[in-house]
Amino acid sequence: MTELTNEYLLQKLQDQFGSDILFSEVQYGMLSIVINKDRNIDVLQWLYDNEELQFRFMTDVCGIHYPDNKDNELGVVYHLHSLTNNVRFRIKCFMPVSNPVIKTATTVYKAANWQERETYDFYGIIFEGHPNLTRIMNVDEMDYHPMRKEYPLEDGTRTDKDDKYFGR
């Protein structure tokens, strides 16, 4: 069996998915790729089923919001782990805030269930096909998603604050 290095893993992914891999980099020793969001399940299923790679443990699913990335403001990040090869791997998918829809990973990893619900709750990303996509941390009456960077960090109308005490 070939040692599963970041370079080898990236080459296997490029051979299989080619132009659907939009970007790749190694951060802190972990391979991270950005893929076409419409192929997320194809990539996840292939990584799970591949007998050599064996990425059968999903460590985390989370959302990200980059408000300055036009048409790619929202993203989903998957962290996978091949316990057999002791290799961790990150996949990112981006989408516009106007259409925050991506296929659910619960068809491949059952662990994605609550993590996708949390991501929906905090970022408003809709996981198409999810068995029970409802809020789990915030009240149902909330009409916004609190982790989106859509609000100013400070209240500009405050008069009781002197900026000199805050290093400004």
Image: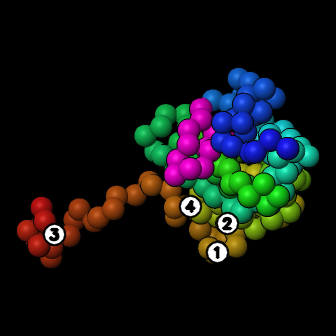
Find out whether the residues at labels 2 and 3 contact each other: C-beta distance under 8 Å: no
Sequence-first disc among 2 and 3: 2
Look at mark 2 in the image and give the residue it sits on: 118
Sequence-first disc among 1 and 3: 1
Look at mark 4 in the image and give the residue it sits on: 145
The Cα atoms of the two marked residues, 2 and 4, are separated by 11 Å
Residue 92 visible in the shown view: no
- Place of residue 7 in the rendered image (x, y in percent of width and height, measured from the top left): 66, 36
Circle 1 SS class: loop
In front of the other: 145 or 79: 79
Find out whether the residues at labels 1 and 3 contact each other: C-beta distance under 8 Å: no
Residue 137: mark: 1
Under mark 3, the amino acid is Phe
Look at mark 3 in the image and give the residue it sits on: 166
Q: Nearer the viewer, mark 2 or mark 4?
A: 2
How packed mark 2 is, by other alpha carbons closer than 10 Å (few <14, some 14-19, many 20 or more), is: many
Q: Give the residue drawn at x 71%, y 63%.
A: 59
How packed mark 4 is, by other alpha carbons closer than 10 Å (few <14, some 14-19, many 20 or more), is: some
Q: Is residue 1 above or below residue 70?
A: below
Q: Give the residue drawn at x 72%, y 31%.
A: 11
The Cα atoms of the two marked residues, 2 and 3, are separated by 34 Å
Under mark 2, the amino acid is Glu
How packed mark 1 is, by other alpha carbons closer than 10 Å (few <14, some 14-19, many 20 or more), is: few
